[in-house]
């Protein structure tokens, strides 16, 4: 009988793209599998999941707002409403299993599945588990994690170390550097810097590039700059009349961006790191300082300790980020060493590992 699986979660690309990778792997192993995504209305999964060819239903739910307590007044009502919506989704779709990838829409879906005895699976991409996942992990069928040492968050017997799933178009890309650079209309003779501040953009990275934009041209570098929506207009304004700067709020075809890049500026979320490991890129990391338990700094520091990355603290980015990139662009030995070390940490088949294990558990 064909399997019916719900994949719940989202909020950022770091949750959505691994979820799509898992869905693709499930379909590859068992093409008849029916998959339904459940996300949060108004969040980017409502756009990105249909683009990937899957159906998604949205919940009216919001996360806890740490910066404005007054905005949390309606939370209990939203949670109750989302649970009613989840009940309706389960009644219509009748899932054999549920997978949670993080983001607050995954909580009511997995909690409901567990209350009904439906197999539930969690993918925790970070080295520091989120609170919702820790609560759900006690009753989960399996918990897939990216790295060792997660027993402090989840029951040891339920953990499978799978690594983080990377989108197939990135993991299996056969694009050359020249193809990547031509895609952006840039010059193959110049070293190319790719700046990716996460799917929503990164304020400190954007402001650092804005302030020192002339340094790229002066040092014979060109820039592919993903700004995120909030900084898009300002970024386009700064790039006007500069043939060596390409700007967009979002890059849909990231495989071309990685192919083009000689150096990368990035946040240090788990998924960004997984992609940089697979694509073997020399990277300068600017960790997002407000991530839960400052896990992005821990992620980046772990790479630095292995000689696989350079770390610039967020508060120092304005002064130090662009000079660090320019300096690295002139040091071929350092670039090669960083590429070699980060490439050794790559896990190319995490999506297949996760999909195989899930299908095994649901017969």
Image (cartoon, rainbow, N blue to C red):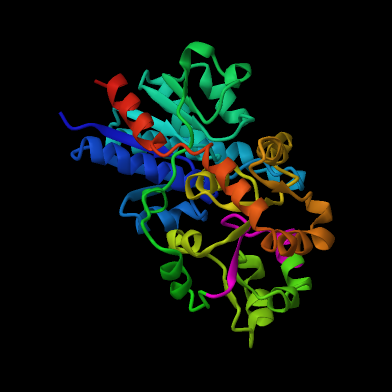
Which residue is located at x 67 percent, y 82 percent? 237
Residue 73 percent coordinates (x, y)? 69, 42
Residue 318 percent coordinates (x, y)? 81, 62
Which residue is located at x 31 percent, y 39 percent? 25
Q: Is residue 194 magenta?
A: yes
Which residue of the protein is positioned furthest toward the bottom in this rendering? 241
Which portion, as a residue range, is magenta? 189-207
Residue 246 percent coordinates (x, y)? 57, 75
Q: Is residue 104 above or below residue 159?
A: below
In the picture, which quadrant includes the C terminus?
top left
Observer-nearest residue: 88 or 265?
Answer: 265
Dividing the picture into quadrants, the one containing residue 165 is: top left
Observer-nearest residue: 123 or 334?
Answer: 334
Which residue of the protein is positioned furthest toward the left in this rendering? 1
Dividing the picture into quadrants, the one containing residue 19 is: top left
Q: Is residue 224 visible?
A: no
């Amino acid at each position: 009988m064909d399997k019916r699986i719900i994949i719940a979660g989202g909020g950022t690309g770091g949750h959505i793209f691994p979820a799509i990778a898992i869905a693709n792997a499930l379909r590859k192993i068992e093409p008849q599998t029916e998959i339904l995504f459940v996300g949060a209305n108004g969040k980017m999964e409502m756009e990105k999941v249909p683009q990937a060819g899957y159906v998604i239903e949205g919940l009216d739910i919001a996360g806890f707002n740490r910066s404005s307590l007054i905005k949390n007044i309606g939370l209990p009502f939203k949670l109750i409403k989302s649970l009613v919506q989840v009940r309706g989704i389960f009644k219509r779709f009748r899932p054999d299993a549920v997978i949670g990838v993080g983001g607050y829409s995954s909580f009511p879906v997995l909690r409901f599945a567990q209350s009904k005895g439906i197999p539930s699976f969690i993918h925790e991409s970070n080295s520091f588990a989120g609170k919702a996942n820790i609560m759900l992990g006690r009753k989960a069928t399996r918990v897939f994690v990216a790295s060792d040492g997660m027993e402090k968050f989840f029951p040891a017997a339920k953990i499978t170390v799978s690594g983080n799933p990377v989108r197939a178009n990135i993991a299996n890309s056969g694009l050359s550097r020249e193809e990547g650079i031509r895609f952006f209309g840039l010059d193959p003779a110049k070293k190319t810097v790719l700046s990716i501040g996460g799917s929503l953009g990164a304020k400190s990275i954007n402001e650092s590039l804005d302030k020192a934009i002339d340094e790229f041209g002066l040092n014979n570098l060109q820039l592919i700059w993903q700004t995120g929506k909030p900084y898009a207009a300002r970024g386009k304004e700064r790039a006007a009349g500069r043939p060596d700067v390409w700007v967009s709020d979002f890059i849909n075809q990231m495989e071309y961006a990685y192919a083009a890049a000689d150096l990368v500026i990035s946040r240090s979320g788990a998924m960004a790191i997984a992609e940089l490991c697979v694509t073997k890129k020399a990277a300068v990391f600017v960790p997002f300082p407000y991530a839960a338990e400052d896990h992005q700094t821990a992620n980046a520091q772990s790479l630095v300790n292995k000689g696989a990355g350079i770390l610039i603290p967020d508060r120092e980015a304005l002064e130090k980020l662009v000079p660090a990139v320019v300096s690295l662009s002139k040091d071929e030995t350092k670039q090669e060493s960083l590429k070699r070390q980060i490439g050794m940490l790559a896990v190319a088949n995490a999506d297949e590992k996760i999909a195989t294990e899930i299908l095994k558990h649901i017969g």
